[in-house]
Amino acid sequence: MLNCLKTLSLKGKYIRLRAPIADMNEIINQLYQTVMLAQKVLPFALEFIGALYIIFILNKFSGNILSLLSVYPRKLISIPGIALYSYIHQDFNHIFFNSIPLFILTILVLLSGLQTFVCVTLTVTLLSGLAIWLLGRRGFHLGASGLIMGYWSYLLMSAYRHTTVVSIALAFICVYYFGSLLFHLIPQNVKTSWEAHVYGFFAGLIASYICPSLFCEKLSGFCYQLHQITI
C-alpha cells in the first residue's frame, strides 16, 4: 500500500523508505497546521504591535520624554535603554515602516512557541542594545529595526540548522519578501542606526543557537515544534 512504509533489503541491511504519497500528505498536513497556528498567534502579534503604538502615543503626549530611554553609547544614564530602545520610535513614519515587517516576522517567530519568541526577543534586544552602548556612534539609537533584523536572521539560521519543510517555507518568505533587509547591514545614512541593524542581525543568529535549547528541547510540551518532516 502507498500509505505504508516500505522495507528494502540491501546486503543484509534493511532500509525503511516512506512512500512519496504519504510524504506529500504529511507535508500538506504540516503546512496546514502551520497556517492554523498562524491564525491563532495573530491576535498576540497585533497586541504586540499595538503596544508599540501606545508607547509612541504616550511619548508624543509627554513631549518625547520616553525617548530618553533610547541608547546613548557609553553613558551610564542610558543603560536602561539597552533593554528598551527597540520599543521607542522618533516619529510616525519611523514606527509605521517598522511595524509592517515587524508584524509579519513576529508571527513567523511565534510559530516556534511563545517561550521561544520571548527568548529571541530578549536575546536580540539585550545583545544588540549592549553592543550599541559599547561600540555605537555618539547619538540616540532607538527603534525596532534591530529587532526586525534579529527576527529575520533567527528564522534564516533556524531553517539552516533545523531543516524542515516548514522552516524552509518560512525562510523562503523571509528571503522573498524581506531580502532587501540584507542591504540595511551596509551604512547608508548618517541619521540611520546601521549599528542596530548589524548587531540585531548577529544577535538573531546567536538566538537561533540559544533559544531552542533553552525552551523547545526542555519544555517541548509548551513549544510548537515542526521537526517531524526532514528533507
Image (cartoon, rainbow, N blue to C red):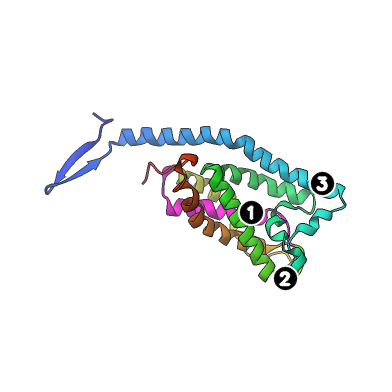
Q: Quadrant of residue 189?
A: bottom right
- For label 1, the residue is 147
> Marks 2 and 1: in contact by CB < 8 Å?
no
In this view, the residue in front, 1 or 130, is 130
Q: Is residue 150 magenta?
A: yes
Principal secondary structure, stretch drawn in magenta: helix
Residue 28 can be seen, yes or no: yes
Is residue 83 placed above or below 38 in the rendered structure? below
Identity, as a three-letter code, of the amino acid under mark 3 = Leu
Which residues are the magenta region? 141-165
Q: Secondary structure at mark 1?
A: helix
95 left or right, relative to 24: right
Q: Nearer the viewer, mark 3 or mark 1?
A: 3
Q: Is residue 41 magenta?
A: no
Circle number at residue 74: 2
- For label 3, the residue is 58
